[in-house]
Image (tube, helix red, strand yellow):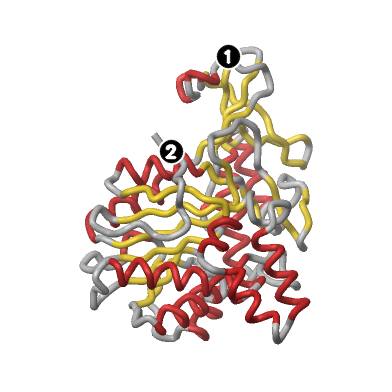
């Protein structure tokens, strides 16, 4: 961490403040390459680690869409940022009961997490990014808590107009500062007259990923689930945050030692995929989507063996004051593929 912090300080000292997106990218690249951040002993826990029910519902959804698409013999399961492989393990175990046994492809840059994934899926194929995935078969893609860690660009309204939010130095401390170049043209027209201090977030990295997913669905067929914490419709304000040891910490304090994230703009993500030819099924709250898939019934069955644990997990995954509303599910499909369950009525994205 000291090396990264010193490197960023030297960079800022030489060329001045750097974009927040660059700071976030450098910090998260170091963070994910040096540890397994999941679980009680890590910094955060994701839905698949909370309960097997989450992955099982994903598997049911994938198998249902695949069967109604005609059960193509060869299909690709792709997961960016698959953690320890827990989601894939639970989802594909259930999917196999319905005949869906896809090729497994993981997009993962962390050596530590690749080792954990290989224990669960020694036959998997690993990729650095989406670009090297096979192009000759339909794709079933699941991205759970992947987009939130991609770099975000922030624009802040100053008395002189809109400027990019940068990271500078106050002594040895990293601090947010405003850049000098006018950025008014990069702000949606409806927000340009906002009061000083207003912040708008955009994520070119997220748009690039969603464009690739949309183009692949259009060309190859298939379906995708994008699951993350975020908002729909669009909103203003900074959502930049850091998690360490399951608590929020100062994101400017120790780059590379905490998970830096921002809420996902689901409407823009859907629009980008749609512009590349994918069909948008809709955007749903995670709680409602899981219940539409039958999670209440599954929880009742598991509660016969472990009632307290199952009830706590079900509440955490579905309750409005937990992950049920803040976390959302975006469903996408190729043009000829059917809609999946849980997206009625859909949220308009145009």
Q: Earlier in the sequence, mark 2 or mark 1?
A: 1
Q: Is residue 181 visible?
A: yes
| Rendering coords of residue 188 (x, y %) | 48, 23
Q: Quadrant of the N terminus?
A: bottom right
Q: Circle 2 is placed at which residue position?
A: 348
Q: Quadrant of the C terminus?
A: top left
Q: Nearer the viewer, mark 2 or mark 1?
A: 2
| Residue at point 65%, 36% (across, down) | 238
Residue, x 66% and y 71% (percent of image)? 50
Q: Nearer the viewer, residue 116 or 68?
A: 68
Q: Is residue 255 above or below residue 172?
A: below
* Structural distance between the alpha carbons of marks 2 and 1: 25 Å
**Which residue is rendered at x = 49% and y = 82% of the image?**
118
- Tell whether 202 sits left or right of 38: left
Asked whether, in this view, residue 79 is left or right of residue 65, the answer is right
In the rendered view, tell whether residue 34 sits above or below residue 16. Answer: below
What residue does disc 1 label? 193
């Amino acid at each position: 961490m000291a090396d990264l912090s010193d490197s960023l300080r030297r960079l800022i000292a030489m060329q001045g403040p750097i974009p927040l997106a660059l700071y976030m990218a450098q910090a998260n690249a170091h963070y994910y390459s040096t540890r397994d951040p999941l679980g009680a002993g890590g910094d955060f826990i994701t839905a698949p680690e909370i309960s097997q029910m989450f992955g099982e519902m994903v598997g049911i959804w994938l198998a249902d869409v695949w069967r109604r698409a005609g059960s193509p013999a060869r299909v690709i399961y792709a997961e960016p940022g698959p953690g320890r492989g827990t989601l894939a393990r639970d989802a594909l175990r259930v999917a196999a009961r319905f005949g869906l046994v896809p090729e497994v492809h993981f997009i993962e840059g962390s050596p530590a997490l690749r080792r954990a994934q290989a224990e669960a899926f020694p036959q998997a194929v690993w990729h650095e990014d989406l670009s090297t995935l096979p192009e000759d078969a339909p794709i079933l893609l699941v991205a759970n808590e992947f987009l939130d860690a991609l770099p975000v660009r922030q624009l802040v309204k100053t008395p002189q107009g809109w400027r990019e939010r940068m990271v500078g130095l106050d002594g040895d401390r990293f601090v947010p500062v405003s850049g000098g170049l006018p950025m008014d043209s990069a702000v949606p027209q409806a927000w340009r007259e906002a009061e000083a201090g207003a912040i708008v977030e955009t994520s070119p990295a997220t748009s690039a990923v969603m464009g690739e997913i949309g183009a692949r669905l259009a060309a190859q067929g298939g379906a995708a689930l994008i699951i993350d914490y975020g908002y729909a419709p669009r909103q203003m304000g900074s959502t930049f945050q850091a998690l360490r040891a399951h608590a929020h910490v100062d994101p400017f304090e120790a780059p590379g030692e905490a998970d830096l994230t921002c809420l996902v703009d689901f409407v823009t993500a859907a629009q980008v995929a749609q512009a590349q030819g994918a069909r948008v099924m809709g955007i749903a709250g995670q709680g409602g989507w899981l219940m539409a898939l039958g999670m209440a019934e599954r929880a009742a069955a598991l509660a016969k063996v472990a009632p307290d644990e199952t009830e706590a997990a079900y509440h955490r995954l579905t309750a409005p004051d937990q992950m049920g509303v803040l976390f959302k599910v975006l469903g996408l499909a190729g043009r000829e593929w059917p809609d999946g369950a849980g997206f009625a009525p859909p949220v308009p994205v145009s």
